[in-house]
Image (tube, coloured by chain):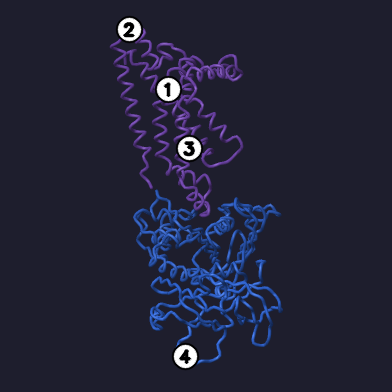
Chain colours: A blue, B purple
Amino acid sequence: MLEVRLCKQLDQFRLDLSFSAPPGITALFGQSGAGKSMTLACVAGLETPDTGRIVLDGRLFFDDEAGVNLPPQRRGVGYVMQDYLLFPHLSVGGNVAFGLARARGKEKARIVDEALARVGLAGYAARRPSELSGGQQQRVALARALVTQPSVLLLDEPFSALDGPTRVLLRRDLLRLQRSLDLPVIFITHDLAEAYLLADQIAVIEAGRLLQIGPPGSIVYRPASRSVARLTGNSNFFAGETLRVDESGAHIRVGDVTLLAPPGKLAPGQAVELGLRPERIMLVRKDAPVGKRDNLLSGDVVNELSDGFNCTLFLRLDEGGRLGRGGYDLEITIPAYVYERLHVAEDKRWSVTVRREDVHVFGAGEERRV
Amino acid sequence: MGSGWFPLWLSLRVAGAATLLVLMAGIPLAWLLARRNFPGKELLGAMASLPLVLPPTVLGYYLLVLLGNQSPLGRWLNEQGFPLVFTWRGAVIAAAAASFPLLLETTRAGFESVDVRLENVARTLGRSDFYIFWRVTLPLAWRSILAGVALSFARALGDFGATLMVAGNIPGRTQTMSIYIYDLVQANRQAEANRMVLVITLAAVALLLVSRKFSRRILR
């Protein structure tokens, strides 16, 4: 278990956060410049926090009050960065063996060969880093970190520089490796899908602060604040006011409409903010039987975008039933095949529905701090 | 070897010793300037580069004052039986001072061109800073250092003013090549002067080529 609490004044903001990382994969997720890399560098001992405490399995790395600041050499962390950073003047084997201070001769060669085999590069020891592809270089960097038998693995955007298929392969390898290692792995990413795919827990970081930490599902589907919702792909936000709360849920007035949300701890008259994930807004099939649906709205598709897999529709609701005053009210994402099956290309007039559970409610104004 | 070749031999010896001296002092200082932050760092860098812009005679004068009999350091050196002023060793000091900035700047640039993050990764792999310097930083900066060595050797070989001030012009003892050429021209010994000029020009061109070859980055 890695426990981190640190404060560090940076140029643009103050890095001030704490979290723990049990064995398993923890993703530090956030935009570039949020302080993720600095956090990792502090854990590795390459940067020094102003104050705080960093402990790994009872071993004290840093504590300003106790005056402890272990140098990186004695922390036993494996550190892998986005652009691999292999030593260009050493062979692949020389790179992997770099951290092997004790082993000699045949023993050393055996360890290097094993480490390379483990990352799928058996027989590459004599090559030069410049002869390898990006994915292979990143594997070497991983092998180089692993031969020192680190007690925590720190990966700073390890897959960002790789092409799509290689990235998929390496992600799979990391998952397999993690299962055999059973140590805390902390990796930085600004790709939500990657964080969701790999991580056991996601820590959402913005401007030096931890906004929320938890299992991927809770981050995406139970965001603690508007910022987390926005960072995790929520794009429909509305200010509203709670009208009443009854057994069916909270009735919240937004624009001309009353939306039904989970009851939560809302009180009548309370100002709130609502978030609707674009892929959780469903088009209502025209041949579907009319039944009771939560939050039924209708309007016209005024614009649309497609990335080939998903289509984003911009829906403008009917006058008198609008949520806001912009050019459109809702951003809706549907899979491309649904777009084709429903013939959205020809038919722009739609009713949509949002399940009560998919209406995220945040307190208005103040961000909730974790 | 005829006495006419003594100045060339002396110049090579002086330049060689000066370059060695400059290397020993320049590499640690260049590393400090490239990798560490401390108060007065820029001032130190500027001071070390001063010989590049000072007139050589002025540089020589400072050295003369610093190392001569009037200074405590000069007196102490004399008592140790190691006088510098008006000896070939003085010429080494003068040539070293004159060529120091050239090696310092190229070496510093060489160290700065090594990605600090490579050194950081090496530290997380458990290696000492000393080991990292020898196995990562130095091997990646050695082309720049060699370029600096060639440049500063050429500068040391050709020094005139500073050497003349500190070591004087004693034929057979402190008369280096460039001073000898001056004497030859003064004495109207054109043919000998031409020969010496040709030798030193060829040496300078060769050294410049070496320097340019190494300062071109081959490693990414």
Question: Is residue A370 in view?
Answer: no
Secondary structure of the residue carrying numbered label 1: helix
Residue B195, by quadrant, is: top left
Of all chains, the one bearing label 4 is A
- Pair 3/4: label in front: 4
Q: CA distance from mark 4 to mark 1?
A: 98 Å
**Labels 3 and 4 touching (C-beta < 8 A):** no
Q: Residue furthest top?
A: B187
Q: CA distance from mark 3 to mark 4?
A: 75 Å
Q: Amino acid at mark 1?
A: Val
Question: Is residue B220 in view?
Answer: yes
Residue B5, by quadrant, is: top left
The numbered disc on residue A288 is 4
Q: Amino acid at mark 3?
A: Arg
* Mark 3 Cα shell of 10 Å, populated few (<14), some (14-19), many (≥20): many
List the residue tagged with mark 2: B188
- Are discs 2 and 1 both within one chain? yes
Q: CA distance from mark 1 to mark 3?
A: 24 Å
